[in-house]
Image (cartoon, rainbow, N blue to C red):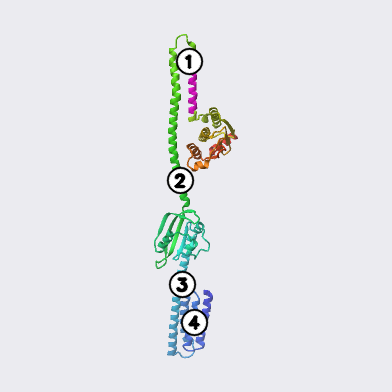
Amino acid sequence: MSTSSGGWIIAAAAAAVFALDVVLPLGVAVPMLYVIPVLLTWLVPGSRITTVMAGCSVALTCLGIIFSPGEFTMADAADRAFATILLLVVAGLLVSQKQSARQIAVIQQARDESEERLRLFITYAPAALAMFDRDMRYLALSRRWMTDYRTPIDVIGRSHYDVFPDVPERWKAAHRRGLAGDIVRVEEDRFVRATGAEQWLHWEVRPWRVNDDQVGGIVIFTEDITQRKRDEEELRRQRARQEDLAAKLLMAQETERRRLAQDLHDDITQRVAAVAIDLQSIRAVSPGSEASLIAQVHRSGKMAEQIATDLQHLSHRLHPSLLEHVGLEAAVQEHAEEFEGRTGLKTQVVVRNLPAVLSLARATCLYRVLQESLQNVRKHANATHVLVRLLGTKGGAGLCIHDDGRGFDYVQQTSNGRKGLGLISMEERVEALQGTFRIKTRPGDGTEVHVWMPMDRHEVTTMGSVGA
């Protein structure tokens, strides 16, 4: 009932009682009727209307004495006093009841609002959260929990152990500790599902309490750290791989230095010494042997020229200066010709759309991959023909070295940890420049080495300007 309509009804009831009091003087029966309007205020919320109506009823009781016909006796006074006391008692009880009801309503509203805030917090929390009672029945859970663990929509009120029957005993023990009032936390916990899938979790169990400080249940927070553990494991593998590569590179450097020292000592140094001996022996030639002297000088010159050529080839292998002076295409052509002349293997070079501008770092990387690949062909392939393709687009440059040799089982070799230092160094060089490295081979079907090297923004812009 609304306050306005209820007030009019109560006022009408009070007026009717007053009319009866004036017209029908019935002794104590009429004064007692003033309690009726006060009781009717129970239908209208708020204690103010009850207080007002109680005061009006007391006033109307007194006015009834004045306007009622007949003589006012002591009995009438007693009746009026008894009715007034009863009216005030009833009004007091109603006011007390309304105030108590209002306080209860405020407390209930605050509790409902608190529960709603808690429900919204848990539902929309960015982490996986679930709230349980003492019997491990779901009270609330976050959407993240439902997503991470594929929880049914109608899970509220159901037992956690019925929904997830494969919960390990160590987690049940943690739940019991939480229900006993403890806070349980594990930073990294490995869990293997019934399907065999491995999952790593960080989780925490906390008790929640009711008004009398008794544990009402627990809240479980979990975080899936499986991807983080995988990343950490991959990082450890990468570090181990880098340490192994660094050790192999140091060993390769020492091996190369020993090889260079041996080549210089056994070949170049010996031939330089032979030239020196020949030149020193010229002064011992007797007069009249000019023809012999000329032949000896000519022979020493040829030997010195050959030494210079061999030193040039050696320095070129160590640092291809052609890359800086005439570019990648000429360096590849020159090296392929030198390889063909040295090994007798037919080596064909195809160049298409090579970018006009390519950084020295990328050109050097492609050239080193070519050197290492041809070296592997010479050592292992037993091939008769090699095709080198150097191709370019607006986005980068690619290199492909294909031989018709015997090939090998690449998957088996790499899975057994037998990947050679040459393959590792090529792959590391390419990946360091954000390129891609791939080998396509199988036994008896030759080998293809594919490298794709993207160009940076400056190179693409410069190439576009050149093309324009």
Residue 326, can we see it?
no
Disc number lying in front (2 or 3): 2
Mark 3 residue type: Arg
The image's mark for residue 36 is 4
3D distance between C-alphas at marks 4 and 2: 85 Å
Going from N to C along the chain, the mark reached first, 1 or 3, is: 3
Image position of 179 with respect to 6: above or below: above
Q: Position of residue 69 (x, y in %)?
A: 49, 89
Pointer 3: residues within 10 angstroms few (<14), some, or many (20+)? some
Is most of the magenta stretch helix, strand or loop?
Answer: helix
3D distance between C-alphas at marks 1 and 3: 127 Å
For the point 43% across and 62% down, the residue is: 218
Mark 2 residue type: Leu
Look at mark 2 in the image and give the residue it sits on: 235
Going from N to C along the chain, the mark reached first, 4 or 1, is: 4
Q: Which residues are magenta?
A: 299-315
